[in-house]
């Protein structure tokens, strides 16, 4: 992976995430060209899709980037070459929240997904928040029943991503930890991202990231390297 992968717990496009996104923008070479994809909200109706699109455009415009909402919302649009071309023209792709299982199924083996991974391979930034973060683990818990685990893109082998980690009670956290078995639960708190670059993982933001597996449980704060 030549670029930067950022997995955020919650808060995409909101003011508390500005420091995180400014740091991600600083990792780009040349002019920032951001593509915001509301794909995970593809089943939630036109109003919600437009809301996510506008939030993304307004947020990154405020940060000084050139930005466009690319409305990949289902498998048909994910295979639309004109939309894939817009993603390829970007050097920063942001996947906002919604339904993680839907997001994975909508993107898997599509032109849009090839374009997204191409941005990462070419040294750009790919960021996902909430559902957009979960798809980069090895598996995704089913909701609301949690079981069975669903496949994901496995950019972090052996890991299951749990966003909104600071919003859940201990009982649910323990249930998910038990469910993942020998895998590592990576709990990402709000307004915080687990950022991967140069083979390392670092916490950026006001919260923390918890790595929990058979070796133990440890919380990492802003600026700390995450190991599991």
Image (cartoon, rainbow, N blue to C red):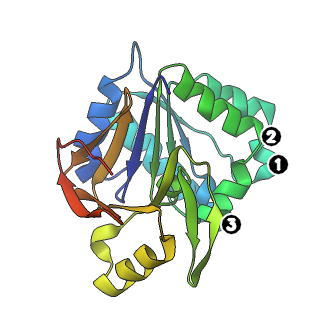
Give me the residue at 27% from left, 33% from top.
22
CB under 8 Å between discs 2 and 1? yes
User: Could you say which disc has been placed on residue 79 in the image?
Assistant: 2
| Closer to us: 181 or 125 | 181
Residue 118 vertical position relative to residue 170 in the rendered view, above or below: above
* Residue at the spot 56% in from the left edge and 83% down from the top edge: 144
Residue at 44% across, 78% down: 178
Label whose residue precedes the other's in the sequence (3 or 1): 3
Q: Could you classify mark 2 by the number of other residues whose Cα lies within 10 Å: few (under 14), some (14-19), or many (20 or more)?
A: some
Would you say 36 lies left or right of 23 here?
right
User: Where, by quadrant of the figure, is residue 86 drawn?
Assistant: top right
Q: Residues within 10 Å of mark 3 (few under 14, many from 20)?
A: some
Could you tell me residue 177's position as x and y percent?
41, 74
Q: Residues within 10 Å of mark 1 (few under 14, many from 20)?
A: few
Front residue of this view, candidates 179 and 193: 179
The relative height of residue 78 versus residue 25 in the rendered view (above or below) is: below
Q: Nearer the viewer, mark 2 or mark 3?
A: 2
Label 1 element class: helix
Q: Which residue is mark 3?
A: 43
On the image, the x and y values in percent for residue 4 come to: 41, 31
Query: Decide: marks 2, 3 in contact (CB < 8 A)?
Result: no
Report the side of 95 relative to 187 (left or right). right
x 25%, y 46%: residue = 203
Disc 2 from disc 1: Cα separation:
5 Å
* Label drawn at residue 208: none
Instruction: Pinpoint residue 118: horizontal percent, then vertical percent.
Output: 62, 26
User: Does residue 227 appear left or right of residue 184 in this picture?
Assistant: left
Q: Which residue is mark 1?
A: 76
């Amino acid at each position: 992976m030549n670029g930067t992968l950022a997995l955020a717990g919650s808060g995409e496009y909101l003011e508390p995430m500005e420091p995180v996104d400014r740091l991600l923008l600083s990792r780009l070479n040349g002019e920032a060209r951001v593509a915001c994809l509301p794909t995970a909200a593809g089943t939630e109706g036109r109003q919600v899709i437009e809301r996510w699109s506008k939030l993304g455009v307004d947020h990154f415009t405020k940060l000084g980037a050139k930005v466009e909402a690319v409305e990949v919302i289902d498998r048909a649009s994910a295979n639309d070459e004109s939309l894939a071309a817009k993603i390829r023209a970007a050097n920063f792709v942001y996947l906002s929240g919604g339904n993680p299982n839907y997001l994975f199924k909508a993107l898997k083996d599509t032109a849009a997904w090839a374009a997204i991974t191409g941005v990462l391979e070419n040294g750009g930034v790919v960021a996902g928040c909430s559902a957009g973060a979960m798809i980069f683990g090895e598996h995704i818990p089913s909701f609301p029943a949690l079981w069975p685990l669903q496949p994901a893109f496995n950019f972090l082998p052996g890991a299951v991503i749990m966003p909104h980690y600071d919003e859940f009670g201990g009982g649910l956290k323990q249930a998910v930890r038990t469910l993942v078995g020998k895998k590592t639960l990576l709990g990402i708190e709000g307004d915080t991202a687990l950022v991967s670059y140069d083979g390392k993982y670092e916490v950026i933001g006001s919260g923390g990231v918890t790595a929990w597996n058979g070796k133990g449980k440890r919380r990492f704060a802003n600026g700390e390297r995450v190991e599991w």
